[in-house]
Amino acid sequence: MTILILAEHDHQNLKSATYATISAAQKIGGDIHVLVAGSKVQSVVTQTGKIAGIHKILVADHAAYEHLLAEDIADLTLSIAKEYEYILAPATAFGKNIAPRIAALLDVQQISDVMEILGQKTYKRPIYAGNAITTIQSSDVKQVLTIRATCFDQALKSETASPQIEIVQGKQAQSQSRFVSQELTVSVRPELTSAKVVISGGRGLQNGENFKLLEDLADRLGAAIGASRAAVDAGYVPNDYQVGQTGKVVAPDLYIAVGISGAIQHLAGMKDSKVIVAINKDEDAPIFQISDYYLVQDLFTAIPEFCQEIDKIRGNGNLGQHKA
Amino acid sequence: MKVLVAVKRVIDYNVRIRVKADQTGVETSNVKMSMNPFDEIAVEEALRLREKGIASEVVIVSIGGQNVQETIRSGLALGADRGIHCETGQEMQPLAIAKILKKIIEKENPNLVILGKQAIDDDSNQTAQMLAALTNWPQGTFASKVVIENNEAIVTREVDGGLETIALKLPAIISTDLRLNEPRYASLPNIMKAKKKEIEVIPVNSLGLDAAPRFTTLKVEEPAKRQSGVKVANISELVQKLVHEAKVI
Ligand SMILES: Cc1cc2nc3c(=O)[nH]c(=O)nc-3n(C[C@H](O)[C@H](O)[C@H](O)COP(=O)(O)OP(=O)(O)OC[C@H]3O[C@@H](n4cnc5c(N)ncnc54)[C@H](O)[C@@H]3O)c2cc1C
């Protein structure tokens, strides 16, 4: 059995979701090949080469793949799909965009957001924003899966890994779609989906300016910042901060929800976090029902106190010392 | 320009989902059903294109049993011109839906097809991409802005790192994200008018395609429940607990 994985990367680094996808493939068992498509992807290939348990890296380095447009990447994958029983991609914006296109071209019903691999083409996946978990068995000969990264460990690195490297000939870009521009959020913080600590703000923050409060706390905890849909819709923070059914799925060691009510669509993206803390001034906020610790307090007093308290226990009472 | 919008009837997003005791699925009887929220956004976008004079006709298509006509009707009440009901009593998985929609595209020749990025019942997020594959049209998924100019759709997409803008040659397939627009409500006169609008019924089994399910559902369960938590009195107690009990900071 041979498994192909579409590597997600930003041309510099392999994304953590790719590591999780590789570890999902290891659960299936068989030879694992990783397709690194892009333009000038040498450093990504080098990183991929240091992961244990990969048999081959397929490198498609071509200007046509600079922006990883679905049409081109699906076409490329199709050209090598024949020898694979399984094709896996992370269930991220990247994988969700491309994998179904590949599946349809192979006449395969993709299985989205796989949480668990049970063998014999049987999988667990969430439905209804994670309010139900379904176990399904596929009858397709080939399997196309997207993997929910938070449900799998990160594939391990190995000093002695030495996968074979094979060059895949790139094709000229198709002319149906073209890249125009991008507006990426620049952040010095850890990536939301792989951070150990996430602090998310909701409508309770009232405006974008007030997210500074959360940043002060995030500085002290080395945390990433997330948000509810309401906070994104209101323009307090960019779209890529959104956690939830239709945003990002996170499962950090510590998730702190501040001024978030706890709609099921939000819970869908964070309820697998190890420890959940909620701070809300409403005694009856639904988020409390799934929190390990909750505090009924106005966030505008609670968050500065939180920062002070951390400074205190770390032995530097000087408030604001760590401010960015 | 003709715009085709595909819509799905789903359990309303406000309904608390209950898994059936026999683990065969979720409770759907006596539950409020609505148009999938992402599809409402798709309808709205099509209507705005018509109001700007870019689209001339907005056609709504839905696939399923008799009751999806209610969903189509609610789209007509928002202002769409006519509906197509692909009738089937069978479970249809995304690949089958994409195949059916392709047939409808062949019949209707739209210049643009808009779909929701995912249905809030099965959360698959596949149909638009699959339809783009089968038609060999370009795709603009997770759209938060759409501009039509010079026979292109300029689509701004919500991606994990921020926003990406791509240009698609028409005809093209677009899937909507939440921030594309804010859907309108149906006005009473429009609800009345919608009753007279045409809904064409096409049996799925007349389309000559393989729409058989490709996976079977073995079990549907409730997710693992979280233990109910501890209320803390103040920040200092919270921090103590996080340090000494949970050991996460
Ligand atoms: C199809 C669909 C998809 C969706 N997808 C997502 C998704 O992916 N992610 C998501 O988050 N939502 C999603 N939603 C939206 C979701 O239903 C909720 O509307 C949203 O999560 C609410 O955000 P919120 O908790 O910030 O706002 P609110 O519900 O308005 O809650 C604000 C909270 O802040 C508290 N508060 C106010 N002031 C203070 C203060 N000074 N101190 C302390 N607390 C305060 C209030 O008590 C309240 O609990 C989706 C909805 C739909 C229909």
Image (cartoon, rainbow, N blue to C red):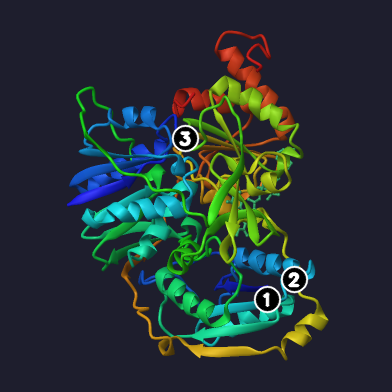
The C terminus of chain A lies in quadrant: top right
Q: Are marks 2 and 3 on the same chain?
A: no
Residue A32 falls in image quadrant: top left
The type of residue carrying mark 2 is Arg
Q: CA distance from mark 1 to mark 2?
A: 7 Å
Question: Left or right: A30 with respect to A140?
Answer: left
In the rendered structure, find residue B49 and report the number of the disc placed on it: none
- Residue kind at label 1, given as amino acid type: Val
- Horizontal and vertical percent position of residue A42: 37, 29
The three-letter code of the residue at mark 3 reads Asp
**Label 2 lies in what chain?**
B
Q: Is mark 3 within 8 Å of ligand 1?
A: no
Q: Are marks 1 and 2 in contact (CB under 8 Å)?
A: yes
- Image spot of residue A294 (x, y percent): 58, 38
The residue that appears at 59% across and 48% down in the rendered structure is B158
State the SS at label 1. Answer: strand
Q: Mark 1 highlights which residue?
A: B58
Quarter of the view holding residue A238: top right
Q: Is residue B120 above or below residue B72?
A: above
Question: Residue B147's spot in the image, x, y percent?
Answer: 70, 57
* Dot label at residue B50: 2
* Of residues A319 and B51, the one drawn nearer to the viewer in this rendering: B51
Read off the chain for label 1: B
Q: CA distance from mark 2 to mark 3?
A: 38 Å
Q: Which mark is residue A10?
A: 3
Secondary element under disc 3, as helix, strand or loop, is loop
Residue B34 vertical placement versus B41 (above, below): below
Q: Is residue A93 visible?
A: yes
Tally the numbered discs.
Answer: 3
Q: Is residue B81 left or right of residue B157?
A: right
Helix, strand or loop at label 2? It is: helix
